[in-house]
Amino acid sequence: MELQITRWDRDHSPKQDELVDNMKAEGLVPYVEDDEPGHEYEPHIHPNDEVLVVVSGELTLGVGDDSWVLRAGDRIDLPADTSHWAETGGTETIRILTASIGDKHDPLRASHTEENLA
């Protein structure tokens, strides 16, 4: 997997069900994560490839010297072992869908349970 940003380019705002259906059509298993504005994720890695899709709110995500502001419908594909950081912006709670591609244990994804399965 290569790092890739895909911007939402449709003429309507995305709905969570639509984003979930798109991910499932790719064989992904999406989980819902919510965070308040101003939440910071320190630099970290995941042992599996990761897909993140913003449902609502705003997320700034950085890799190395590059950073991107992701908004509703935007997606980032991150290769395994890519050091990245993030922070939530805006004034509303952010909701993202996350999915891992691979079967390596990831303690940072311990919150992925039946309760937040999309």
Image (tube, helix red, strand yellow):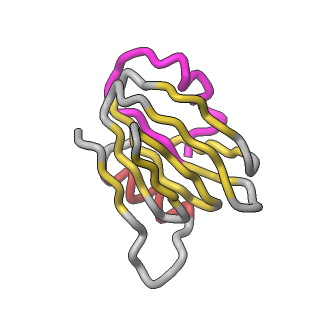
Q: Residue at x 29, y 44 (%)?
A: 3
Q: Is residue 89 left or right of residue 31?
A: right
Is residue 29 placed above or below 10 in the rendered structure? above
Furthest-bottom residue in this view: 11
Instruction: Determine the image quadrant of residue 102.
Output: top left
User: Image check: 53 left or right of 79?
Assistant: right
Which quadrant of the figure has residue 55?
bottom right
Residue occupying the point 48% across, 53% down: 53
The boundaries of the magenta stretch are 97-118
Front one among 27 and 94:
94
Figure check: 75 above or below 18: above
Q: Residue at x 73, y 54 (%)?
A: 93
Specify whether residue 30 is painted magenta.
no
**Residue ID at (35%, 60%):** 6
Which residue is farthest left? 1
Is 72 above or below relative to 113? below
Q: Position of residue 36 (x, y in %)?
A: 75, 47
| Horizontal and vertical percent position of residue 94 | 67, 53
Q: Is residue 49 left or right of residue 116?
A: left
Residue 65 picture location, percent across and down:
40, 42
Number of numbered discs on residues: 0
Q: What is the x, y in percent for residue 82?
A: 36, 30
The quarter of the picture where the N terminus appears is top left
Residue closest to the far front: 65
